[in-house]
Image (spheres, rainbow, N blue to C red):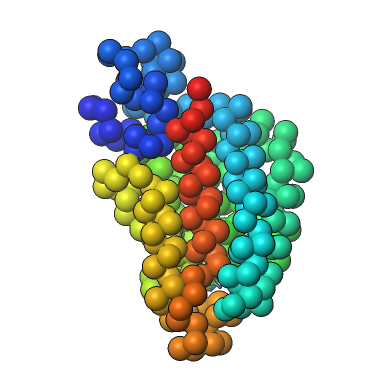
Amino acid sequence: MGEGGTALPRRLVPHHRTGLLSQGPSVTLVQNKNAEGGVQIDETMRRRLIEAVAETIALHAEELTAIDAAQGDGDHGLNMNRGFGAVTAKLDDIAAKPLPEAVQEVGRTLVMTVGGASGAIFGTAFMAAGKVLPEAPTRADAAAAMDAAVAAVRARGKAEFGHKTMLDVLGPVATALHGDATDLPAVAHAAAEATAGMQAVRGRASFLGERSVGGMDAGARSAALIVAAICGVVEETP
Ligand code: ADP
Ligand code: MG
């Protein structure tokens, strides 16, 4: 398998693990990749992933709430911040679990604590992704996990692509993972911005009918922030 074959996208793999900055495979590369080319996500990294996601949600909580206020009921930032605050409160326990269980526990915690449509739907997405992730995911595994999240959101939210929800970010990110795109945060942010031109079919924004066109979807913005935070940690982990 060549670099970038079934491995995580380059932006999802620290440079020293891709061998980009070194001549041939480094010791770290060998230590962090299993025979199938998966990247071992150890406890330190699991902790950093959770902290990074919680931090970006907290930093953008007001913005998320403002986006939701224009289209929904103005509680999305509060909802997401409450959920990831509850996840952070269990950081030690969750990070100690193997990756698949840790991701599922994040999902369960969101379902239990968020309230609002987004808790049930984001929570279900994390639970579905965790169920299919191995402890050392390859790029193909990451794509399969995103496919599982997409399927879960479609089933739980009865949402389809173009309905102006978080699905309109998760779908393009899944497609990008199946292809050879390297800048997943850019894909996710562009997808979130594209929801501005959509008319909402699901969620409270659908009550606005045609007036829902013009502003970004709040859940789509959250999904893009989460994707970007995850990619940032994987890329920067020493
Ligand atoms: P609520 O709509 O209950 O106030 P939030 O404001 O926290 O919950 O979350 C709203 C976001 O949830 C929307 O922007 C949208 O992305 C997502 N959402 C709402 N309903 C659905 C649905 N049926 N399917 C998929 N996503 C949905
Ligand atoms: Mg809301």
Number of residue marks: 0
* Residue 55 x/y as whole percent: 64, 45
* Residue 214 x/y as whole percent: 46, 78
* Residue 154 x/y as whole percent: 46, 67
Seen from this angle, which residue lies furthest right? Answer: 89
Classify residue 82 as left or right of residue 46.
Answer: right
Foreground of the two, 62 or 224? 62
- Residue at 42% across, 28% down: 14
- Residue at 49% across, 39% down: 232
Classify residue 3 as left or right of residue 193.
Answer: left
The image quadrant that residue 195 belongs to is bottom left
The image quadrant that residue 213 belongs to is bottom left
Quadrant, the N terminus: top left
- Residue at 60% across, 41% down: 52
In the figure, 206 relative to 151: above or below?
below
**Can residue 117 be seen in this snapshot?**
no
Seen from this angle, which residue lies furthest left? Answer: 2
Foreground of the two, 214 or 139? 214
**Can residue 24 be seen in this snapshot?**
yes
In the figure, 98 relative to 190: above or below?
above
- Residue at 67% across, 62% down: 62
* Residue 50 x/y as whole percent: 62, 41
Seen from this angle, which residue lies furthest top? Answer: 27
In the figure, 209 relative to 44: above or below?
below
